[in-house]
Amino acid sequence: MSHFTGRRAAAKCSICGAPAVARVPYARLTLCSRHFMEFIERKVERVLRRAGALRRGARLLAAVSGGKDSAAMLTALARITKSNGVEVVGLHLVLGFGPYSRKSREAAEEACRVNNIPCIVLDLEEVLGAPVQAIARRARRPVCSVCGLIKRYVINAAAVELGADYVAMGHNADDIIAYTVKMFLNQDLAAIAKLGPSTESIDSLAVARLRPLYEVTEKESLLYAILSSTPFLHEECPFRPVTPIEERVKEFMNRVEEEHPGMKINYIRRLESNIELYKKIAGIEDWDIQQCQSCGLLSAGNECSFCRLTRRTLGEAKGAYIRRVIRELAAGLATRNS
Amino acid sequence: MLILPEHRITTVELETGKVRELVHKLGYATEGVIVVKDGRPLLEDEQLEDGDNVTLYRAASGG
């Protein structure tokens, strides 16, 4: 006769029987640290393989904020690309948001260092001559919108100057769901077309984007960063709105997911297969691709939004200057490597 | 217990003592958080003991 002690034995990994650290209800798996990490790496590898990024000699520029997602992405990329001959370079942008930015930079550099990935650091306040929030104030626009515009521009410019084949962004599955639900609520269906797991390069104007964590949920990304001991900063940006719509969507989806496991992964997989449909709605083939007359990168009109923003708020279009600064940083990196 | 990223310290009284109950009592979904005890992430149906000191990471922040 067995004695009931009131305590259950610790859960075991479905694969090897070691003590479990994660349950993955939608896959009906309970996993130990090693097998959870492999589960996540398989998802990341699938995105890279489908985009054609796992080829010898490919160069991948990883945007590293210092948060949990870029930490998880860096470690997964470092482990996957090791045997494929793919080069990974990190890029961290210093936003000039006081102690938050200082700690973010330390975490980003540390995450690159432990993964043996070179890290390019660009101080935006230094190169633009004003902090991001001051530019936003002058433009009379929300800080997040201006910060996003500047980051998108500088990351693409850096990828072009470094001759990268892909830019890897740390958006996780919950981010993608939240962005696309918000776009749907705004009936901005054309914008959804840009949120697939990868986008195409446009010769010398824009570098293809890759979202390695496309099928990795926010919780999985955080757990992977913790289990892999990758350094990261778990803090809110001081300029984050009190409750952005995206966070409300995430809270709602997490409650639904808890009651109906699989909702999020099904959403993300169907979104992936519907991206071509959204591209048709957006009429992407008919989009007029132009070159910015100030900096020479991708633009929707005569001058790109970054050059227009900096011309209006700083007195001159800064695109060409930013490209030059990055070229010099890239040359420094090449010298260090040789 | 400690809640991150806001660094809030609080004490919670539980009936069943399960991690899931702790998460729900604080108003979160288990899908949105990770509870760590002595450096080890806990499963939702694990049992906590009286006086346990845990850290709850809210996933939907930072990063």
Image (spheres, coloured by chain):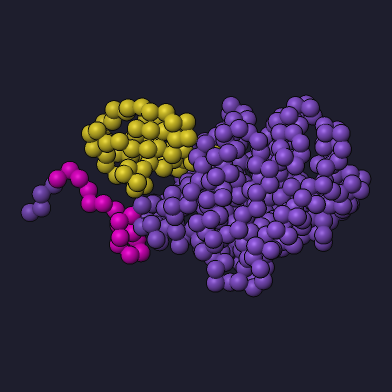
Chain colours: A purple, B yellow
Measured as percent of width and height from the top left, residue A229 is found at: 44, 52
The quarter of the picture where residue A19 lies is bottom left
Q: Mainly helix, strand or loop, the magenta region?
A: loop
Q: Is residue A309 left or right of residue A75?
A: right
Q: Is residue A81 above or below residue A206?
A: below
Measured as percent of width and height from the top left, residue B28 is found at: 44, 34
Q: Residue at x 84, y 52 (%)?
A: A297
A301 vs A110, nearest the viewer: A110
Q: Residue at x 75, y 26 (%)?
A: A137
Q: Is residue B14 above or below residue A291?
A: above
Q: Residue at x 87, y 38 (%)?
A: A316
**Looking at the rendering, in which quadrant would you find the N terminus of chain B?**
top left
Report the number of numbered marks: 0
Q: Residue at x 36, y 27 (%)?
A: B10
**Looking at the rendering, in which quadrant would you find the C terminus of chain B?**
top right
Write down the region rendered in magenta: A5-20
Q: Is there any visible trace of residue A198 in the rendered image?
A: no
Measured as percent of width and height from the top left, residue A124 is found at: 71, 41
* Residue A15, magenta (yes or no): yes
Measured as percent of width and height from the top left, residue A117 is found at: 58, 59
Q: Is residue A287 left or right of residue B12?
A: right
A67 vs A45, nearest the viewer: A67
Q: Is there any visible trace of residue A128 in the rendered image?
A: yes
Considering every residue shown, the one lying at the far left of the view is A1
The quarter of the picture where residue A147 lies is top right
The quarter of the picture where residue A49 lies is bottom right
* Residue A19, magenta (yes or no): yes
A307 vs A121, nearest the viewer: A121
